[in-house]
Image (cartoon, rainbow, N blue to C red):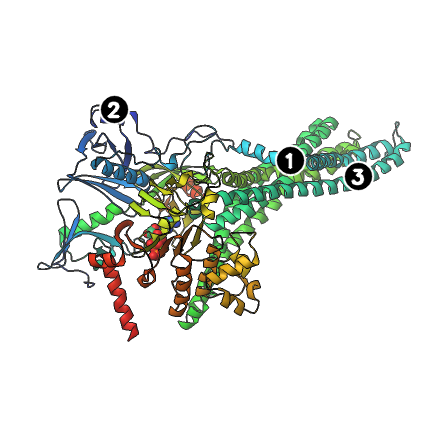
């Protein structure tokens, strides 16, 4: 196991080098320090390059190190004559400074500097409007530059937790901590494993005694030892069986407890994580962390560690016995051992690479099956059966090739290993047999050596695999611990007041938001919603409507600006208080596997049947539910009865209103249903919005007619707001959308 | 919309702001702030180039760049190259793994660089044999043909293919 303590250089671009700061000093203004900076890491020619841009004191300075003749500094005052833009490309983007309508500077940067340039651009734009470089509500350091809570060093953005603090050895210790929670199991299991190993060493020794001192005729023959020796052998066999059972049973149990602890902790921690964490990680990875990785640790704790320790003990023990008996022969016998361990080590390494490749080919092959079976109708419709067969044949042949290679490798390994160990046997024969004949070597000792040499097989294999086993276990443990240690980005502040009631006034103050830190999905949104009002949110697809309500629910925190409810910043609310008083119907309503009643009551575990029926009635869902043969006991969700889109919508509306929320959020509650169902849902909504602050999103503008005010979002900007009449009179985007829809309606009404 | 490819009358130039301006034919209207994009950035690099306006509406799809006025063609190529950055790896010096996290020290056609790779799955081999490495920030680095690397680099790459 390599325990490397790598000192990592900081990410390029994350710190402003002293010489650049020196170069820029004075250029930003008399005593202005760079408030924000970014590194343009690509030379215009496409090689890596270096140019720095920094803002501060209402100026933008660029220090360009790309030219051969030496660094060049240019300064641009940030006033109304300046336009700044980022031209986003695939892999590399450009930052442009346009002064009085002319291109003044163009810097090229790669993906890894994207977030910094995005921040730089926005802060420069704020400076040019005469505002501060860092917006109110914006974290002083970007989130990706979190400092490790343990060592205080920068956590690289690509890791969930500080890798330096999750060092290999420490990880193993931490894993052992879980084992130590069940001390009895650990001690009994480990103790019996050691005892069994010690017993394993005895039989050849007894054989030696038996032959030399009992069976062979000699002067100091002790025939009275015969039966005690046979008895001892029987006892050893009997006790070993018991120890073996104890060891396997206790350690397997211990492993199960550890996995259970880790699994449940990981799942519980996952529930605390913010949405941003889930959208970054594919679901499959999270599932495999909770299941596969913990499973692997079971294997390691229950068997791996013990095997390795025992193997080492065995080799040392056997060596001690052999050397005590006949040092010269012992040396000969042991010679092939280091070589065997080395052979095993390289074998395991080669196998790993091959198995990985085989695995990739394998998943390519199963991918074809997984692709074709669900798509079988398309295959048949286009009569492409032959082509799919050929595709599968190709993938299967690739699997065959690699499998053959894998078999070649391991079928070479085993004979090699046995050859090496047989060399030991051969050495014993060649050395000892002639000497036994000349009576210079005792027969019993000869037999004992032969008995021990076969006992090297197991330990050699385990020692050769040790490195790989530790690697795997440490990697799995790291994945699990990294999950356990990842801090949620959205959390309740310790100082937040508990049990506050929501009155319902929502306010967006200059809110900007970005999912990835580069592209702004919302830009400077200002919006006031008085308690009890109904706001209709509309605009083109991708405009940021769902994002806005994600922020109201505090699934994410804004990048800039703040959102308040009843005048209190969302970040100062208790998360539970907040979310339990907001009822949400999501754009893609999700039903869990369970009954209709369980699904409606999901957000309020203690709800009575009366309350559930009342909520279903309010959502116009009662009638169709009673129409199901199993009524409220109908199983829905995955594998249950499939409900239609409109029914699903109404069930999720019922779920949202069960808590009697103060704020109701409806994201496309009437999408993808026929007009009659839409009317039913609309009717329910009209009833539910009374007395509640409501934000309703709809593409069909007709469904927003009850809204007190309409808000139009386009490309992340709030472009219009007002009543229907006001917006029609303004003849802007809303009027345009409205006219198109009216035309469509007329077209189909004919 | 013109999809017939080469058109000697088609012009593209930069305005003073550095943005591209497009005109389909000498008499036609000009469109400002346009952008060019490859339709097949991996498989057909020099064919099918789309010219798009600032609202991402296609103005023209060029089947090939042949037959364009020399200056226009040069400008298109310059723009396409400026948007792309997927350095070709010429040698792998070292791969350090720390759990799942890998640090690749490589030499590329753009210069030496250190890549932080988040997980084994980010090093993939395509069916064509090309190896793509995605670093933590989403940047792509490529090896066109592993067989052309030196022996040491090749074994490092093969050992770490996800
Ligand atoms: N989890 C996410 N991660 C990254 N980008 C996202 C995420 N969710 C949405 N986006 C992007 O943010 C932008 C706004 O998305 P949003 O869902 O808010 O649009 P919308 O107005 O609700 O659209 P629609 O009317 O189609 O529902 C889109 O460009 C989208 O691609
Ligand atoms: Mg949406």
Q: Choose the circle earlier in sequence order: 1 or 3.
A: 1
Question: Which chain does the residue under circle 2 lie in?
Answer: A
Question: Which chain does the residue under circle 3 lie in?
Answer: A
Q: Secondary structure at mark 2?
A: helix
**In the rendered image of this protein, does residue A737 appear above or below residue A480?**
below
Q: Quadrant of the C terminus of chain A?
A: bottom left
Query: Is residue A637 something that shows in the picture?
Result: no
Q: Nearer the viewer, mark 2 or mark 3?
A: 2
Q: Choose the circle earlier in sequence order: 1 or 2.
A: 2
Question: Which chain does the residue under circle 1 lie in?
Answer: A
Query: Is residue A304 something that shows in the picture?
Result: yes
| Disc 2 Cβ-to-ligand 1 distance below 8 Å | no
Local crowd at mark 3 within 10 Å, few (<14), some, or many (≥20)? some
Q: From the viewer's perspective, tell me whether residue A133 is left or right of residue B98.
A: left
**In the rendered image of this protein, does residue A1 appear above or below residue A416?**
above
Q: Which residue is mark 2?
A: A22
Q: Residue at x 27, y 44 (%)?
A: A93
Q: Which residue is mark 1?
A: A181
Q: Where is residue A567 shown, x and y percent of the image?
A: 37, 41
The label number, if any, that marks residue A239 in the structure image: 3
Q: Choose the circle earlier in sequence order: 2 or 3.
A: 2
Distance of mark 1 from mark 3, alpha carbons?
28 Å
Labels 2 and 3 in the same subunit: yes
Distance of mark 1 from mark 2, alpha carbons?
56 Å
Q: Secondary structure at mark 3?
A: helix
Distance of mark 2 from mark 3, alpha carbons?
77 Å
Q: Where is residue A481 shown, x and y percent of the image?
A: 52, 38
Local crowd at mark 2 within 10 Å, few (<14), some, or many (≥20)? few
């Amino acid at each position: 196991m390599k325990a490397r303590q790598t000192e990592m250089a900081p990410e390029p671009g994350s710190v402003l080098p002293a010489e650049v700061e020196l170069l820029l000093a004075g250029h930003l203004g008399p005593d202005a320090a760079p408030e924000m900076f970014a590194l343009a890491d690509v030379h215009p020619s496409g090689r890596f390059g270096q140019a720095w841009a920094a803002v501060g004191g209402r100026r933008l300075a660029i220090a360009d190190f790309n030219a051969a003749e030496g660094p060049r500094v240019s300064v641009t005052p940030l006033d109304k004559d300046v336009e700044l833009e980022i031209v986003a490309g695939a892999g590399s983007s450009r930052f442009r400074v346009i002064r009085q309508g002319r291109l003044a500077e163009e810097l090229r940067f790669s993906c890894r500097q994207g977030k910094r340039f995005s921040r730089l651009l926005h802060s420069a734009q704020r400076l040019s409007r005469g505002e501060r470089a860092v917006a109110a509500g914006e974290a002083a350091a970007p989130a990706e530059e979190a400092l490790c809570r343990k060592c205080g060093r920068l956590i690289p953005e690509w890791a969930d937790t500080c890798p330096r603090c999750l060092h290999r050895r420490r990880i193993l210790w931490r894993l052992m901590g879980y084992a130590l929670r069940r001390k009895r199991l650990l001690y009994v299991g480990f103790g019996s494993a050691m005892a069994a190993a010690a017993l394993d060493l005895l039989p050849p020794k007894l054989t030696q005694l038996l032959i030399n001192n009992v069976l062979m005729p000699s002067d100091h023959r002790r025939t009275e030892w015969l039966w005690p020796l046979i008895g001892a052998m029987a006892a050893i066999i009997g006790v070993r069986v018991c120890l073996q059972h104890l060891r396997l049973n206790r350690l397997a149990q211990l492993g199960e407890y550890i996995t259970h602890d880790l699994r449940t902790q990981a799942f519980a921690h996952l529930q605390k994580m913010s949405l941003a964490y889930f959208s970054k990680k594919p679901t499959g990875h999270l599932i495999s962390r909770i299941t596969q990785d913990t499973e692997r640790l079971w294997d390691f704790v229950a068997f791996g560690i013990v095997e390795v320790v025992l193997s080492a003990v065995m080799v040392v023990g056997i060596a001690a016995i052999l050397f005590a008996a006949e040092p010269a022969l012992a040396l000969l016998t042991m010679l092939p051992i280091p070589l065997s361990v080395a052979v095993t080590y390289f074998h395991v390494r080669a196998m790993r690479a091959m198995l990985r490749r085989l695995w990739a080919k394998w998943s390519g092959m199963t991918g074809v099956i997984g692709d074709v079976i669900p798509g079988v109708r398309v295959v048949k419709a286009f009569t492409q059966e032959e082509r799919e067969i050929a595709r599968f044949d190709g993938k299967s042949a690739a699997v065959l090739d690699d499998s053959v290679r894998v078999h070649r490798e391991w079928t070479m390994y085993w004979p090699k290993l046995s050859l090496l160990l047989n060399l030991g046997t051969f050495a014993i024969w060649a050395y000892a047999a002639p000497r036994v004949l000349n009576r210079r070597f005792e027969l019993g000792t000869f037999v004992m050596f032969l008995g021990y040499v076969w006992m090297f097989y197991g330990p050699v294999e385990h020692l050769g695999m040790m490195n790989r086993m530790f690697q795997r276990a440490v990697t799995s443990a790291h994945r699990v611990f990294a999950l356990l240690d990842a801090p949620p980005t959205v959390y309740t502040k310790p100082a937040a007041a508990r049990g506050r009631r929501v009155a319902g006034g929502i306010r967006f103050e200059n809110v900007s938001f970005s999912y990835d830190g580069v592209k702004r999905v919302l830009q400077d949104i200002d919006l006031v919603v008085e308690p009890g009002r109904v706001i209709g949110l509309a605009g083109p697809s991708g405009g940021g409507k769902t994002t806005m309500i994600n922020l109201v629910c505090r699934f994410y925190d804004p990048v800039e600006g703040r959102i308040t409810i009843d005048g209190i910043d969302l970040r100062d609310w208790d998360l539970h208080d907040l979310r339990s008083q907001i009822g949400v119907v999501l754009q893609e309503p999700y039903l869990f596997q369970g009954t209709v009643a369980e699904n409606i009551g999901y957000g309020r575990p203690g709800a009575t049947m009366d309350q559930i029926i009342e909520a279903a009635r309010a959502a116009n869902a009662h009638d169709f539910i009673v129409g199901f043969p199993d009524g409220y006991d109908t199983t829905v969700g995955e594998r249950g009865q499939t409900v239609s889109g409109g029914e699903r919508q109404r069930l999720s509306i019922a779920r949202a209103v069960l808590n009697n929320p103060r704020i109701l959020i409806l994201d496309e509650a009437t999408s993808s249903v026929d007009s009659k169902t839409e009317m039913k849902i609309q009717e329910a909504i009209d009833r539910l919005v009374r007395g509640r602050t409501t934000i309703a999103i709809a593409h069909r503008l007709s469904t927003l007619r009850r809204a007190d005010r309409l808000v139009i979002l386009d490309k992340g900007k709030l472009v219009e707001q007002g009543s229907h009449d006001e917006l029609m009179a303004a003849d802007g985007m809303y009027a345009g959308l409205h006219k198109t829809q009216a035309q469509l309606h007329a077209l189909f009404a004919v | 919309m013109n999809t017939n490819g080469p058109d000697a009358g088609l012009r593209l130039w930069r305005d003073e702001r550095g943005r591209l301006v497009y005109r389909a034919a000498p008499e036609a209207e000009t469109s400002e702030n346009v952008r060019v994009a490859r339709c097949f950035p991996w498989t057909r690099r020099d064919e099918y180039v789309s010219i798009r306006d600032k609202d991402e509406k296609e103005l023209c799809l060029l089947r090939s760049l042949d037959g364009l006025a020399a200056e226009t063609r040069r400008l298109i190529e310059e723009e396409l190259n400026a948007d792309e950055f997927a350095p070709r790896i010429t040698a792998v010096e070292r791969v350090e793994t720390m759990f799942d996290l890998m640090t690749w020290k490589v030499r590329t056609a753009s210069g030496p660089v250190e890549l932080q790779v988040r997980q084994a799955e980010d090093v993939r081999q395509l069916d064509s044999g090309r190896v793509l490495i995605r670093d933590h920030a989403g940047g792509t680095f490529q090896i066109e043909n592993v067989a052309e690397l030196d022996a040491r680099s090749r074994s490092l790459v093969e050992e770490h293919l996800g």
